[in-house]
Amino acid sequence: MAPSSTVTKSRDVLGTNALRPDGAQKVQGSFEFTSDMHAENMLWGATLRSPHPYARIVSIDTSAALALSGVKCVITASDVPGKLTYGLISSDQPVFAHEFVRYMGEPVAAVAADHPETCRRALALIKVAYEVLKPLTNPEDAISGSHDPIHPDGNVIRHQRIIRGDQAATGAVVVEGEYVIGMQDQAFLGLEAALAIPDPDGLGVHLHVATQWLHEDLSQISACLGLPAEKVRLTLGGVGGAFGAREDISLQVHCCLLALKTGRPIKMQYSREESFFGHVHRHPASIFMRHHADLNGKIIKIDARFVFDGGAYTSTSPAVLINGITHTQGPYKCDNATVDGYAVRTNNPPCGAMRGFGVVQACFAHESQMDKIAAAVGKSPVEIRLINAMATGDPLITGQIMESVAPVARCITETDAIPLPPSLDVNADELELPGGSGLTSSQSNIVRGIGWGVSMKNLMYSEGFDDFATARCTLKDGVASLKFATSEVGQGFVTLAPQIARSVLGVDDVLIEPIDTEIGSAGSTSASRQTWMSGGAVDGACRLVRERLFHHVGKIHNIDPLRLVIEGTDVVDQMGTFRISVADASDGIEISETFEHHHRKTDELDEHGQGNCHTAFAFVAHRAVVDVDPDLGLVKVVQIATAQDVGRVLNPLSAIGQLEGGIAQGLGLAVMEEIVMKDGKVRNPSFTDYLLPTALDAPDVVAVMIEEYEPQAPLGAKGIGEPPCISVTPAIVAAIRNATGKAIERIPVRPQDICL
Amino acid sequence: MTVIVAKELSTALAALREHADARLIQGGTDLMVEINFNHVKPTTMVSLRDVQSLRTIRQDSPGIMSIGSGVPYSVLEGEPVLSAIPALAQASRTVGSPQIRATGSLGGNLGTCSPAGDTLPVMFALDAMIHLSTLDSQRVVSIHDFMTGVKRNVRQHDEIITAIDFPIVQGWQGYSKVGVRNAMVISVASACLVADHKHADVRLALGSVGPTIIRCREAEAWLKSSQDLTAGQSISLDIAHEFGRRAADESSPIDDHRSTAQYRRHAISVLASRMLRKAYQ
Ligand SMILES: Cc1cc2nc3c(=O)[nH]c(=O)nc-3n(C[C@H](O)[C@H](O)[C@H](O)COP(=O)(O)OP(=O)(O)OC[C@H]3O[C@@H](n4cnc5c(N)ncnc54)[C@H](O)[C@@H]3O)c2cc1C
């Protein structure tokens, strides 16, 4: 079983470099990830997947698999007792393919057996007869209607326009481009895994799972199982990264179904190859943008058309589309805009959430455009961005007023003030050159380039969604226990929550209770939202407890509770000499309070894309310095300088970790990470061929945290998870353009794009 | 599955004779991947890890370094190989990650015989000789005859590769590999160039651009006829480019998910001309 609780001890309050409670375990290899879990009498589950991007299922014969010794059950679509489909926004994805398979890797059946090897053999014995159909793989064919609907809901998942200001406005300078973004994978290291334990009476199930949002999983799972929600309980297993890939259901329903059907615990875990088919990816997109500017480079109007390839099922495509198009302008003022956006259905793998969520794609386009405007009017990349920089109070192209702290100009100037790295040393280690350990280049082959990227990113959920978070704090004998359903996926909420409790309550010892569905929802660990939302909930619950503690102390010692404050680990009378330790003050009593944190209300967009659809925003600037070997098209990112609008730093160590990690992920998209598709088939589902940056690819990161307290945020801190990976990608590409003079409009940039 | 952990070469050789399906395992960095992906399902494994005679580096005759098939790359990266056969040390450094290099071996690179195997172009450029033993016989095969196709070679089931003989050559040599990231990457195109001052020769072998490693005999011959290749010469840019162009002509790459044929050919021309210039700097 997963560790049920974690106690952390120390004076690690907000603002200190508190260490992760699970850090040492993770480094030593003793942390229990979900894939390490085990239960008495457990069986293994495995999934049969479609080899075809698009086919009609003629028949499924499971008899030979069932006859194999050690196989306990085989299930298909006809065994799903409840709802046959699930989905985060639209319930259009089948638990098991029914009549049609719509992408390569779609689940068709699942088996339970006594051993993973028996499972594998059983899968090979399931005979599925397919009538192979011509897949729809070009998103434009989904829009034009030239391909028959591949799903009853049609081939266009969502279409949305933004019409703002003077549609006829023009500028003296017009620049445009057609930008293409490849399909990136979240590539978390802890593969999908779950352990489902059926209730003894067979009427319910307890699922231990690595996920981003326990309660959303719960409602989708219980609907498919045909069980009331209270018959399904979820506990978070150890999660090894998420980045959006665990927002959608993968093996959850399969695992529970097998457990209920066999009456035995079922363990499921994906291999790396299966994982590439088992979760959604970042949307590939093509984006046309045309900017009109005046001779000074000030933006007058933007025309844009976005096409996001959502793959076979909806997932979060509608929200990704809205994020993309509402960030068309980036962190710049713009009064007039015409934007047309599509999220479409194809027979490519389904795409959904990934760090940056639609804004990554938009940012690559708008930042490429900013450099084109700069070149057209003879300004530097920094000047053009400062001329256009947005500030608090500016209207967005949706008509929403920017109410967040918006230190865009500061992000740019403070990044600009970071010293450039020294020029390439004559005796530079060859490993440090582009090509690295391949020893392909000498110093004389290398050209250096500098590029810029600046971004705006919405925080929390949008379009009227109330993604609240719940937390409970219990103070007893000087120990604070915190209960929440917030998924810890590596982001560090289990570090932050005790910091909050220590700061608010003056306790040393903080216990984190099991993270499960025995309390209200925390919302998803996504959209850079948990510090703000679950942090707000923990803070709120701790404050309520503190009030009650003050009343308790006040009553006993006859002091007006309003005079009491926490100082260090004591309750102190501000106007007198009375002082008592929190441990003594709470001795023998138990105070427990639950708090729900809700963010401000947002609205849906109207048909012209107008409305206050977003909650809040954060900003960041990146400057990339790259060395390029132009003849071979190889790149080494030397340095990333960044200044990020963080509101307030709650844990410097965690914060820099988010920045460095995000930068590595954005670098991956810039120069190497891509799921290569051909005719709807994934060509590189492995870490041999889906390349992630190594230590030798990772640049030096020089970061400045811009701390301007965000009044809307409960702790003054903005979400910092997504911004680091957004504008670093266009900054690197701009630096490659700067070094080579090549007009590169596609990411990831491949060697042949540079040298051929 | 039975695992026979041999301490002596003879034990391993006998086990191969006895079990028709036995698979040899040295570092396991290729074989275990195959097994994990269910591509092979051996019922008998013969481990060579404890056979010390396969882990030696010897220089019995002058001008030849004989490297045991089980010596890990982490050893080949350093001395004495680094000074005697620098191209082999460089190729060894490019293999995988430190974990892979701590256990992967030349025997395994030859056993797998992938056109992307990093040490194979070095063997082709240096005309290395492969020692093969059975329980009752031994033979020595030129690397040019050993590799016959993509993951195909002339090794018989009951043979073990014991050692590889590398001539020690006077002159610059190097190995370059192009991949899309800066470390731990399968080669998209690679080249080993050896300048042999004694014979006034330059030899060039290419990896990942054909079904086997390609030795560029025509480009080599053209170069020898157009240029004095003794020590101390310098190579003009024109000669270097023409050499690169001719090397690219001898490659026969394909398009796949890792790269395109066009890029691979281009990369070969760049690598060959750069290395030639470096060799005579
Ligand atoms: C993460 C990773 C990265 C890698 N990167 C690279 C790379 O950059 N470049 C590269 O070239 N390779 C790379 N490889 C492949 C592999 O490491 C090399 O091919 C290595 O040389 C294999 O050696 P080994 O000792 O591990 O072979 P094993 O896996 O033990 O054996 C491989 C094959 O050779 C046979 N064999 C082994 N020893 C002998 C012998 N003495 N006689 C006869 N047959 C034998 C085995 O039966 C088997 O068929 C990588 C592998 C991994 C897993």
Image: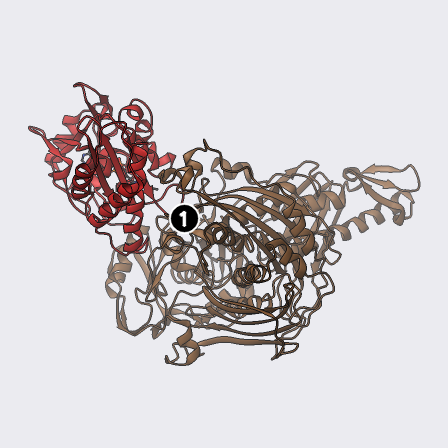
Chain colours: A brown, B red
Picture coordinates of residue A722 (x, y %)? 58, 55
In-image side of A384 versus A662 (left or right):
right
The residue wearing badge 1 is: A630
Q: Is residue A393 above or below residue B67?
A: below
Picture coordinates of residue B133 (x, y %)? 11, 30
Q: Nearer the viewer, residue B107 or A468?
A: B107
Q: Nearer the viewer, residue A509 or A733?
A: A733
Residue kind at label 1, given as amino acid type: Pro
Q: Residue at x 26, y 59 (%)?
A: A124
In-image side of B273 versus A83 (left or right):
left
Q: Nearer the viewer, residue A645 or B198?
A: B198
Q: Examine the rendering and report whether any part of residue A241 can be seen.
A: no
Question: Residue A466 is drawn in which quadrant?
Answer: bottom right
Q: Residue at x 88, y 49 (%)?
A: A562
Q: Secondary structure at mark 1?
A: loop
Picture coordinates of residue A131 (x, y %)? 26, 74
- Letter of the chain that mark 1 sits on in the rendering: A
Quadrant of the displayed image that contains ligand 1: top left
